[in-house]
């Protein structure tokens, strides 16, 4: 393992902004991870763990500590004796979409709706990534992690992960001390298509394939096609995908908002709360689809996506996000939260 110095972080993030890491290490084994943590401890510097750099905004001043880029690799497939499911143990540095593609190639079910999401496997339980009616928690068995101070390795079983909407134990004050090294998933071998989500259902209807049973690869192809239209090309623009979380509000607050916006959609979370599609709020209630100031804007085809059109600084992006947040609050009274993690601010 090599400790590098003054490494520009913008080259490792999909947002394409950010200053230098004072120290930088790529770790490819758990042993190297422990070595990197010892280096940080010996030099009394903070640690930031980086995967694919797809859900972070790094300050222009960079990070005055050690950035550890997780590049652990390896996938282990274990089929149950009855052939009903396959448990898959995946190293945290594996690219998420490559892994999802392999599951559909093998005819497995459970992750196909989460296709074309950038990042690494290690981020999937932290964010409890979700899309098109599916969340990572639906198939995660357990998570293996190392405590960054004690070096202790621990397995967190599903219930211990405290999964919520784009949330988990690993985003709590205590959980942030743990570095994920492996995630275990339980996938099904029998057909379990989930195509009720509007965009997915319409895709199959428009392509006249609703009359036959679709495969997990068919669904993956559909998701990739849908996302290709709704999300900007990462090779062209800087973006972290959906910048904000969909807000969850009380049913009472929703009913009040419906007096002003009768067509506002919602999804029931529990007896007291509903989730509001923020894309609808930004587009219909705030008329912000395609809104742009300077080098930063909301994508014209999906207003949840904040885009660096080139040349933006981190502070400009943060300021733009604040403007959007204020406009949403003025229109609806809803306080929206970033899904993207801010580093070095």
Image: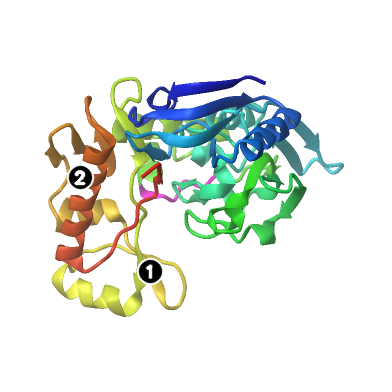
Marks 1/2 in contact by CB < 8 Å: the verdict is no
**Residue at (14, 55) in percent of width and height:** 286
**Quadrant of the drawing holding the C terminus:** top left
* 258 or 292, nearer to the observer: 292
Q: Based on the picture, tell me whether residue 197 belongs to the magenta stretch.
A: yes
Residue 333 vertical placement versus 325 (above, below): below
Task: Determine the residue located farthest toward the right in the rendered image.
Answer: 81
Residue 118: percent from the left, percent from the top? 46, 32
Q: Main secondary structure of the magenta part?
A: loop
User: On residue 274, which mark appears?
Assistant: 1
Q: How busy is the neighbourhood of tag 2: few (under 14 within 10 Å), some, or many (20 plus)? A: many
Pick whichever of labels 1 and 2 is earlier in the sequence.
1
* 121 or 254, nearer to the observer: 121
Residue 163: percent from the left, percent from the top? 57, 58
Whether residue 300 appears in this view of the structure is no
Residue 33 relative to residue 3: left or right:
right
Residue 77: percent from the left, percent from the top? 76, 32
Q: Secondary structure beneath disc 1?
A: strand
Highlighted range, magenta: 193-198
- Corner quadrant of residue 37: top right
- Corner quadrant of residue 262: bottom left
Task: Determine the residue located farthest toward the bottom in the rendered image.
Answer: 252
User: How many numbered dots are placed on residues in this image?
Assistant: 2
Q: Which residue is mark 2?
A: 320
**Residue at (21, 72) in percent of width and height:** 257
Task: Determine the residue located farthest toward the front in the rendered image.
Answer: 43
Residue 11 vertical placement versus 270 (above, below): above
Residue 56 relative to residue 304: left or right:
right
């Amino acid at each position: 393992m090599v400790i590098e110095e003054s490494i520009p972080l913008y080259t490792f993030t999909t947002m394409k902004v950010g200053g230098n890491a004072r120290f930088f290490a790529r770790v490819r084994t758990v042993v190297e991870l422990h070595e990197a943590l010892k280096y940080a401890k010996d030099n009394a510097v903070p640690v930031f763990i980086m995967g694919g750099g797809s859900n972070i905004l790094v300050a222009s001043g960079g990070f005055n500590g050690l950035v550890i880029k997780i590049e652990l690799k390896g996938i282990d497939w274990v089929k149950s004796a009855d052939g009903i499911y396959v448990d898959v143990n995946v190293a945290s540095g594996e690219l998420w979409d490559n892994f999802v593609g392999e599951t559909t190639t093998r005819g497995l079910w459970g992750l196909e709706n989460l296709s074309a999401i950038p990042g690494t496997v290690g981020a999937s339980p932290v964010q409890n990534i979700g899309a098109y009616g599916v969340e990572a928690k639906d198939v995660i068995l357990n998570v293996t992690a190392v405590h960054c101070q004690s070096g202790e390795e621990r397995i967190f079983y599903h219930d211990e992960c405290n999964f919520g909407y784009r949330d988990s134990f690993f985003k709590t004050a205590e959980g942030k001390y743990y570095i994920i090294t492996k995630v275990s998933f339980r996938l099904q071998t029998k057909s379990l298509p989930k195509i009720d989500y509007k965009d997915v259902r319409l895709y199959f209807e428009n392509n006249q394939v609703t009359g036959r049973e679709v495969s997990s690869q068919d669904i993956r192809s559909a998701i990739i096609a849908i996302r290709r239209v709704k999300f900007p090309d990462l090779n062209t623009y800087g973006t972290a995908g959906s910048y904000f979380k969909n807000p969850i509000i009380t049913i009472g607050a929703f009913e009040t908002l419906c007096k002003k916006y009768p067509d506002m959609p919602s999804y029931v979370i529990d007896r007291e709360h509903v989730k509001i599609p923020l894309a609808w709020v930004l587009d219909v209630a705030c008329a912000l689809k395609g809104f742009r100031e300077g080098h930063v804007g909301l994508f014209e085809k999906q207003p949840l996506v904040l885009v660096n059109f080139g040349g933006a600084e981190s502070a400009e992006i943060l300021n733009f996000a604040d403007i959007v947040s204020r406009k949403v609050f003025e229109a609806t009274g809803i306080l929206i939260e970033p899904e993207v993690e801010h580093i070095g601010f």
